[in-house]
Image (tube, rainbow, N blue to C red):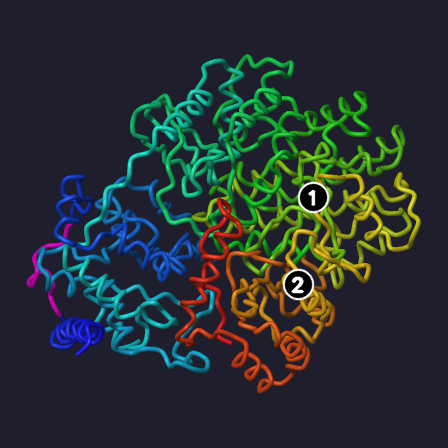
Amino acid sequence: MTTKTYFILLLLTVITSCTTVYQTVESPDYSDLYGPSQPMQRILTAKELEKSLANNAISYHNDIKPILESRCVACHACYDAPCQLKLGSTAGIDRGATKQLVYDGGRLSAVNPTRLFIDAVNTQGWRDKEFYPVLNERKNSTQAALNNSLLAKLIQLKRDSPLPETGKLPNSFDISLDRKQECPTVNEFDKYKQNHPDWGMPYAMPGLSLKQEYTIMTWLQEGAKFDSRPSLSSVALQSIAQWEQFFNRSLLKQQLVSRYIYEHLFIGHIHFKGHPNEEFYRLVRSTTPPGQPVNEIATLLPYDDPGETKFYYRLRPVEETIVEKTHFVYELSQDKMQRYDELFFQADYSVTKLPSYQAEIAANPFLAFADIPKNSRYQFLLDDAQYFVSGFIKGPVCRGQMALGVIRDRFWIAFFNPGGKNSLPEMDKDLQKFVADHYSILSLPGTAGNELGLFGFKKYNDLAEEYLKIKDTFANQLIVQYGGFQMDDIWDGNGVNQNASLTIFRHFDSATVVKGLVGDTPLTGWIVDYPLFERIHYLLVAGFDVYSSINHQLASRQYMDFLRIDGENNFLRFMPTDQRNKIHDSWYKGITGRIASYINTPYYSAGYETGINYQTTHYKKEFFNQLRKRLGKAAVNKDIINECEQEACIRKEASPLQQSVDVSMRELAQIKGHDLGVLPEMSLVRIRTKQGQTDQVYTLLLNKTLLNFAFMTGDNLRRERALDTLTVIPGFLGSYPNFFFNVQQEQLPEFIAAIKNANSSADKDAFYSKYGIRRTNPEIWQYVDWFNAQHKKYRGVRAGLFDLNRYHNL
């Protein structure tokens, strides 16, 4: 008998013994069997850890964490983790699960927040909030460690009832986004098992390997202990101390600037330039000063009153596994500190009083931060525009259908020049005065918080519409005085900053922001000014509460309509005046009634000509080509796969192999309309190359065309499938792959032809069988590992693990 065979038999013996326990206990009373349940001290001291490793015990950090990250975090991260069971940190594992829902579209009142690391300070705190354990919290014995562990039972259930190894998932699996969640406690597990015998973990995916199961089961039997968190390096501590000193200075101007920066950075992952790729921090408010352990103040929103106790801005290490769907990085460095000094402290202004935290002031950034010059605030946003747009596109709300249902599947963004018309001081003063004079009608739904009634959105809709009207009058006055809007009115990134142009991709309820103009010329574009940029952040990032009632979420979604219209109207002002209505109407087909009254009102300087002298009738395309020329080095390299205008379209940085594959992918990008019916919204393609060469990765993004984006639901009723397009991206883009494809390089022509010709259900099934990696494929985890590894290699500090919650059953 070989060592390998003996090892596998030993594993089977252990697992079979677990099965025996489960089968002989039908309705156990765990209190009688193993005593009362109470949280355990699981974190090992340095001395205990040394002893544990010396005894060859299973290490959480070395043995368990890699398994959970590669097999479990793919679904159990962020707010959309089933049963709020977050397995990306020791705190999340020990917290366990709950039957409470984060996403509840019918919720009439707000619920208490359950943010990990924030809303409870220890496991008992989570028990008080109705979270129950997935690890054993009763008698410490090897039998109790398995039989009283929900994690062990769910893993074993998968071993008892594995998936089929071919074809689609059985109908017994529900992988829809809004499926009813089954969240059994350990006492309810027998009923769960009886009702859903094939719903073991990982859910709707192949099970763990025998070695992985054995490792987890052994760890559970050893008491499920956690390694203590490694201490921060001296270099990290030095950077933290430097920045915490900066954020906590005493002058009123310094305090106001720190508050402004905090309210914009609170949501992201802060990284010190040049530090290890795995080190990230959150900027928080704490009752404890620098040098002491952080005691984060658990306010719901960043502008909520922190209380009467003196607080400090602190940098708190991120302890969770980094996942792509919530990962957007803001980099701090000496250059950034110098930039802050230029923007906020070299400017000539004074602060004599700090703004109140009362909602009507704090929720309105134009009022709260009126003392800080508008251009300082605006340039702060522009410098890292991708990060700030990512706040509402890719924040930890995770399931952003409410926020993202308002935008198209792909569009381009540029920004107004902070200085206005050729940086004329007179116009700059006019712009500053306009913002200052109209801060009241720029109020946002967040001002009302959860007191907003069912029809409370109407007040803010009326204010938003009034703003569009007043702004249109103001823009027309500027045109009369300074001439029509032209390229000089667009921010050029100071010739180097690639944040000057962005592309947004929407994938139904998630989205991605990238620098540059990616894809061919889109249907729509936005030109963003300072009031629009700031309102996007305070509506859908700083002021958005995922735990709020449907009233709050409805008001936010309704108001975002006006922000989209504002950006689109800005874009239309750069189009020939006799073309604006035609272009606008192509965006909003089938609009009637009250919605038509504010969408179709031409608040885009009708009758006032642009300052651009167009040479063709392809106005949008010509505009963006001129924009690229204006940006110069700040423009990202032109997309030569999706917008090739000449025969020799070659990625200069690409290898001969990549250039060869690009030729085929360029042909794929030309497929449109109904011929794309076999593809999901986001898929990753692994191109298998000849031995010795690196396999290539491409992302396929289906851009769905809708008649309009004026409604929150009913996307399928407004589809214009004949106008759908495909964007092909070398490398990675997106967080939630819907499907993996595996294609040999020599098969690419056949693969492309199969996409075009997959019309019937049988055609599609054959296509997925030949090229796709289905959920039932025993090798799917190898593909997950490979894509994650390549993603990390490709994007470095900005890469996180992909999420499989939206992986389709095709």
- Name the residue located 56 percent from the left edge and 26 percent from the top edge: 335
Which of the labelled discs sits on residue 660, or is there none? none
- Mark 2 secondary-structure assignment: strand
- Name the residue located 74 percent from the left edge and 35 percent from the top edge: 491
Please name the residue that numbered disc 1 is placed on.
501
Instruction: Decide if residue 725 is in sight here.
Output: no
Left/right of residue 562 with respect to residue 242 in the rendered view? right
The one of 565 and 533 positioned closer to us in this rendering? 533
- Mark 1 secondary-structure assignment: strand
Which of the two marks, 1 or 2, is nearer to us in this view?
1
Q: Where is residue 727, by image quadrant?
A: bottom right
Horizontal and vertical percent position of residue 783:
45, 67
Q: Distance between the residues labelled 1 and 2?
A: 19 Å
Q: Where is residue 281, by image quadrant?
A: top left
Instruction: Evaluate if marks 1 and 2 touch, with contact meaning CB atoms under 8 Å apart.
Output: no
Furthest-bottom residue in view?
762
Which of the labelled discs sits on residue 703, or is there none? 2
The quarter in which the N terminus is drawn is: bottom left
Residue 683 belongs to magenta span: no
The three-letter amino acid code for the residue at tag 1 is Ser
Marks 1 and 2, the one that precedes in the sequence: 1
The three-letter amino acid code for the residue at tag 2 is Asn
- Name the residue located 44 percent from the left edge and 55 percent from the top edge: 801
Up-down relation of residue 351 to residue 46 (above or below) = above
Q: What stretch is highlighted in magenta?
A: 28-38
Horizontal and vertical percent position of residue 759:
65, 83
Question: Mark 1 packing: few (<14 Cα in 10 Å), some, or many (20+)?
Answer: many
Up-down relation of residue 364 to residue 327 (above or below) = above
Horizontal and vertical percent position of residue 138:
12, 56
Horizontal and vertical percent position of residue 182:
33, 67
